[in-house]
């Protein structure tokens, strides 16, 4: 069974950067589609970025050019580098794994962008 643990959230000023990490257990990481979602207060959870097992990526329009998703299969870890952060990026960020329809969520890490 896959387990996901996020880290790297915190408080950052507008314009700053953070890197989120998601460590996965299990043996299927390299064959899984890994994604980052976020949920802001009072809003629905939304897809931020995703990366396939082959390394193809896609991003929400709101983060294109600012966020970068990457993965290290040797470390069973997926990252989200977030630059030029805006107050609107404040949310709980969740790691998600999809292995042939088997979906797993992490517990989330809070990112707060505020001066």
Image (cartoon, rainbow, N blue to C red):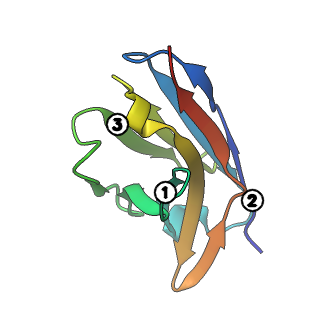
Q: Which is closer to the viewer, label 2 or label 1?
A: 1
Label 1: how many Cα within 10 Å (few below 14, some 14–19, many 20+): some
- Answer with left or right where residue 107 lies relative to residue 22: right
Q: In the image, residue 97 lies at what x, y percent?
A: 57, 67
In this picture, is 115 found above or below 107? above
Q: Which residue is mark 3?
A: 67
Q: Is residue 42 above or below residue 19?
A: below
Q: Are marks 2 and 1 in contact (CB under 8 Å)?
A: no
> Disc number at residue 19?
none
Taking the spot 52% from the left edge, 29% from the top edge, the residue there is 19
- Circle 1: element type: strand
Work out how far the residue at label 2 is from the one at label 1, CA to CA, in angstroms: 19 Å
Residue wearing tag 1: 37
Distance from Cα at disc 3 to Cα at disc 1: 12 Å
Residue 14 percent location from the top left of the image: 41, 18
Q: Nearer the viewer, residue 40 or 64?
A: 40
User: Of marks 2 and 1, which one's residue comes earlier in the chain?
Assistant: 2
In this view, the mark in front (3 or 2): 3
In the picture of the structure, the residue carrying the numbered disc 2 is 25
Seen from the viewer's position, the closer of residues 101 and 28 is 101
């Amino acid at each position: 069974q896959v387990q996901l643990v996020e880290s790297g959230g915190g408080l950052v000023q507008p314009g700053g950067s953070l890197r989120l990490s998601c460590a996965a257990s299990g043996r299927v990481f390299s064959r899984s589609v890994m994604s980052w979602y976020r949920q802001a207060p009072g809003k629905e959870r939304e897809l931020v970025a995703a990366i396939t097992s082959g390394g193809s990526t896609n991003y929400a329009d709101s983060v294109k050019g600012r966020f970068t998703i990457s993965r290290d299969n040797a470390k069973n870890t997926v990252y989200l580098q977030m630059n030029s952060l805006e107050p609107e990026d404040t949310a709980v960020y969740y790691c998600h794994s999809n292995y042939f329809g088997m979906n797993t969520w992490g517990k989330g890490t809070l990112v707060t962008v505020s001066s």
